[in-house]
Amino acid sequence: MSCPRIVLAGTNSGSGKTTVTMGIAAALSARGLAVQPFKAGPDYIDPGFHSAAAGRPCRNLDTMLLPGGRLLELFSRSAASADIAVIEGVMGLFDGAGALDERGSTAHLAKILAAPVVLVVNGKAMARSAAALVAGFAGFDRKVPVKAVIFNNLGSEGHYRILREAVETETGIPVLGYLPRCGSIALPERHLGLTPAAEHGAVAELTETVRRLTEEHIDIDRLIALAASAPDLPVFRPSIFTSPPAAEARIAVALDEAFHFYYRDNLDILEHLGGKLLPFSPLRDRDLPPGTEGIYIGGGFPEEFAAPLAGNVSIREAIRSAAEGRLPVLAECGGLMYLAERLEDRQGEVHPMAGVFPGVTRMGRRLQALGYCTGRLERSVLPGVKGAALKGHLFHWSLYDTEGNDHLLSLRLEKNGTVFRDGPALGNAFASYLHLHFGTNPAPAKRFLRTAARRAGRK
């Protein structure tokens, strides 16, 4: 399959690759090209900005969770209808699972996709040393094709000319342009990283500003030519979207400013397996969508919206009533926080939540868990039978206190030799801090849909 594509990789976190990716996606879209954006790794926040810039949903590509064949299947399925694919990397180009382990890195992803790499360099306070930096990245692993450079955070055109001359003369690698230092395009941050696009009051204005700067300072024609130089995608055997539907079921999906952390491919897989997805807002809707047969509540920032979530008593009661009636409910991270009885925010104020599970979630002063994790179910619950393995990603600041109801916990997680329990489950409701990718294992998605259909009396 032919697919023009580029990977935008940083020298380190904070190099500016998210802003550069936004600008390139917006500039390409403004030319009338269909741009499919991707983000390396388990990030949920950056994809929101790329979706806004490209005008189509950004998708994650995670080489820690997905083997090469499945990653290529997800990539090709999404990119097939696009003119060009733009992939933002994660951290620095070679940062992965360990000191000598490339898994999970942007470099690993670029190899699997056989995609040319554009290195994004924060050029502030640099001159000829930029050439040494680029030479080091280009020569570190010759199987990773570093084909071009874009500078970020430059104070002047003169500074750019110095950097370009040094890099092109000393390394032979072309420099495609730069983004100037500009406070109006700085992306705001908080405890999980960037403030999500769903909460950014001026994301359209931001996108337009970055697009304009990109068109002024980056050679888009050369970038398109570089993407077009990518070889055909490596051959793979499809395995995700080849299975027959599991069961038809109407699944209400929480989707608003408080809950929007979903792998887009998870939603696609649910639909492929027979799910009809019904978006609803726990912030604004008074009831679940008509005909709801299952509920999926992803991650997000319920702590930032605790008061309005608590104030929407009607939807909280509807969700609790649905769970008590054994409607299947699947929740992840922020969804767990919402399903608990109470949420204690950073200021110590306690807010009533849906109350599907007893206990309280409390916002911590530090990050509680980060990274990939494998768990095993201690009893049969919504996503699997006793002994089934669940693999996913953790990233949370809050802690769930069962207040003496540890018997509800169903999932034994292990990370870096530490074992802890998670997964409150009651009836057909299950929640966990673990974010699952159904492309890794579609069994939980199938079981979810079959439980919903069976509860509705269809299977």
Image (cartoon, rainbow, N blue to C red):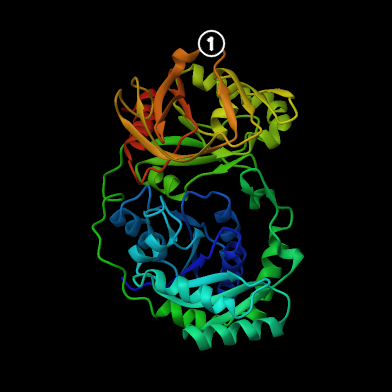
Q: Nearer the viewer, residue 50 or 190?
A: 190
Q: Quadrant of the C terminus?
A: top left
Reply above or below: 176 against 435: below
Q: Nearer the viewer, residue 440 or 150?
A: 150
- Res. 46 visible in picture: yes
Say which element carries label 1. Answer: loop
Reply above or below: 435 against 83: above
Residue under pointer 1: 404
Residue 106, horizontal then vertical, whole percent:
44, 61
Residue 378, horizontal then vertical, whole percent:
35, 21
Residue 406, horizontal then vertical, whole percent:
48, 14
Q: Residue at x 35, y 50 (%)?
A: 66
Q: Residue at x 61, y 81 (%)?
A: 163
Query: How many neighbours does mark 1 have within 10 angstroms: few (below 14), some (14-19), or many (20 or more)?
Result: few
Report whether 349 appears left or right of 449.
Answer: right
Report whether 205 appears left or right of 72.
Answer: right
Residue 217, horizontal then vertical, whole percent:
65, 80
Q: Residue at x 41, y 65 (%)?
A: 79
Reply above or below: 383 against 151: above
